[in-house]
Amino acid sequence: MDASTAVAADMPEPIDLRIDSDSLARHVESLGAIGAQASGGILRPVYSLAWRDATAQVAEWMSNAGLDVYRDAVGNVFGRLAGSSDVTILTGSHIDTVPGGGRYDGALGILAGIEALRVLRECGRPKQSIEVVALCEEEHSRYDTGFWGSRAILGLIDPQEPDNLRDQQGVPIGEAMSQLTLDPAQIASAHRRDLTAFIELHVEQGPTLEAEHKQIGLVQSIVSLSMLRIVVLGRADHAGTTPMNERSDAGYAAACIAREVVDLTTRLGAPAVATVGAWRVSPGASNIVPSHVELLVDVRHPDEAAKRQLVAAIGEAAHGIAKRTSVSAVVSTRADIPPARLDPGMVGVIERGIQAGGYSYREITSGAGHDSQLMSRHVPTGMIFVPSASGRSHCSEEFTPNDDCVRGAEVLAHSLYELAYE
Amino acid sequence: MDASTAVAADMPEPIDLRIDSDSLARHVESLGAIGAQASGGILRPVYSLAWRDATAQVAEWMSNAGLDVYRDAVGNVFGRLAGSSDVTILTGSHIDTVPGGGRYDGALGILAGIEALRVLRECGRPKQSIEVVALCEEEHSRYDTGFWGSRAILGLIDPQEPDNLRDQQGVPIGEAMSQLTLDPAQIASAHRRDLTAFIELHVEQGPTLEAEHKQIGLVQSIVSLSMLRIVVLGRADHAGTTPMNERSDAGYAAACIAREVVDLTTRLGAPAVATVGAWRVSPGASNIVPSHVELLVDVRHPDEAAKRQLVAAIGEAAHGIAKRTSVSAVVSTRADIPPARLDPGMVGVIERGIQAGGYSYREITSGAGHDSQLMSRHVPTGMIFVPSASGRSHCSEEFTPNDDCVRGAEVLAHSLYELAYE
């Protein structure tokens, strides 16, 4: 059976949930200008000035859409459409970006949520309340924490974290919050106990939907992810006077390790991926043998056991290379996120939303991590994907045609309607 | 014949040129505190505040030693002992440091020069003037220019350089000068036409003198050096959603290149050395495939032809790896400094200075670049080396016992005496 043409027997009466496509396109463009860099791409790390401006802008649009707007202790911004019961359906995504990131990653899920709630508001008061959220942090672009925003909502932030979590300049995340008048002592108040569902719309960030000419991706599961930190310690020496065989060159060892990470992951074959994206080489002068290198290694696999095997192989390779090259290497795990299987009930709701619009779709596994990954462990969660041009993401070329964005927002509106009105 | 016990037939009458060892030790310690970093080592790049403080301190010590002090247009600081003719013998070294550098590299040549001139001043007015100089820049730690100070003295700075030469923050070197009240329009006025000799005292920065228990190194020549810039261009992609075989990973390619630079230089064997000390990996986030990497590669060999062969082999390797890994690589030469053979007359003067003190010594090739390398092409130039503990340099562990420093300063004083008084 071709899923894209299937018609479910229990499909609800057709309702008119037409999305304002101009508004969505304008908002994508305007939000993409906040934090835009001369060199291309967007830089909007959590608690930066660009981040502050972006959250203020989103709050204004929520208000213009007729929603009640409020901000929680960590700076998540909510737009609420109050219902007649005391439970809440939540949609949204993150507002922070990676350095040089694109306009759609995270942003589209917020902006589509605002448009969906704008049209739902015209359907009258829902049974359950609906909220759209701009989650403050997901990309760990400034702090080595993922999911700061959704962790606050789920009550998963440790009381020591505001002091202990520091950025590269040594600024604790609590101090960064205080600078924007957010009180780290109030973080516990962000914990929500009224959520009955979470739906996140997101760009695919991969090539599958575009390649297969599918308009919507129905996410079944999210990949398992580990982030490793490999610190290589050698000895600083003069580049001109120290013979090659007397060096303890941390740069050389790190190069061998980075190469081996890619080579062994490539040998393992798809769907395993590993990336050495962040390098810090010290002291970093051309005429000094490097003494200290820090690498961050991102490892993903849909299968948890396969990911663990790959992580172990990378650790073994790093230690073997360190021994051979007369340096020391310390491998630690900075993040370890198991795969998420999304809630079958929510997948069904979204599938009916897709069918209501008559769109082509396919079931898909997300290779990227998302707030939904964490949310799904605590709240029934579903995800809607829209296509990414050429599969490009985390770069300025990230693009999704507005028609695809509108289709995704409409599926979201239908899904929220079923959850909150029926 | 054992050079260390040889006695030259034409050795001059013994004169008392005893160096103030306490003053030299105190100055090494005090100057080493300017720009000292909490993480260890010294950071004193040209035209920084630490650099400004260091030059002011050295000027004060020159003045206290009874010398006439002045500063030229680029900020070289001179202490002058005026003679009866209009030509000048120059000694000194550089005051800037590499990041995390030591107390002796550059600094010792200035401080030993001040002590040598202090004692020479008591011998009366010389026939030729003698000056000690704190050269403003040699390490290209802030700007990709070597020898900025000695190039000014030799009239080798291009009029466009003050505008065109920029640091990593984009600040032109002319603007950095202006911030410290140095006028870039006056650079040509720093050109000296009165120099008849240059002598530089420096730490060896290698292990030979210590290992062979020699007190002084009589430098015969300085190694040939090339600095290459390798820019690798790939494509930024999402670390989770881009299959390994669809990536254009500039980080992977750069790691392969850096590894090959070291491997092929090691295979070539001593005395060839090559170092990949500076890495810039962009965008530099753990969850983005690197799109852009810049490597600086320092290549040295005493033999010019052998260095050129190694440079060519590195370029070929980089292009081969780029092709194999689906990225592009651009290799350019940032600096190309031929080997320097020092003036035989000056080597003779220094050798007699060593013999006057009765010190053990050996002839030596410098593996490090020095201002003397450039000066020697225009002015008769000699170099005196003192031992480096364990050969360590360009690091906080850099050390030379004060007795060795004093012996070097005494050899310098004897050499200057022969040149200026006899």
Image: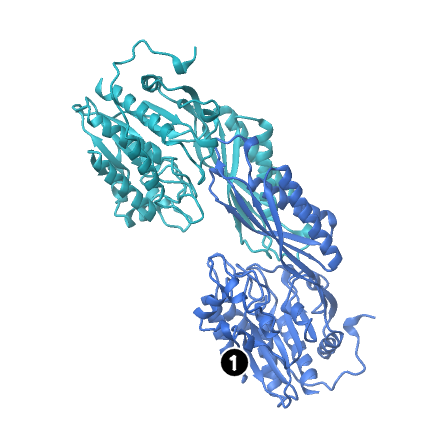
Chain colours: A cyan, B blue
Q: Say which quadrant the N terminus of chain A sits in.
A: top left
Is residue B20 visible in the rendered image? The answer is no
Structural crowding at the residue carrying mark 1, measured as other residues with C-alpha within 10 Å and reported as few (<14), some (14–19) or many (≥20): some
In this view, the residue in front, B234 or B304, is: B234
The residue under the point 29% across, 12% down is A11
> Percent position (x, y) of residue B7?
79, 78
In this view, the residue in front, B154 or A404, is: A404
Residue highlighted by disc 1 = B70
> Percent position (x, y) of residue B215?
69, 69
When the figure is inspected, residue A171 is found, relative to residue B78, above or below; the finding is above
- Residue A232 sits in which quadrant? top right
> Percent position (x, y) of residue B315?
67, 48
The residue under the point 34% across, 23% down is A382
Task: Name the residue furthest front.
Answer: A22
Is residue A146 visible in the rendered image? The answer is yes
When the figure is inspected, residue A413 is found, relative to residue B29, above or below; the finding is above
- Name the amino acid type tagged 1: Tyr
Task: Name the residue furthest top.
Answer: A9
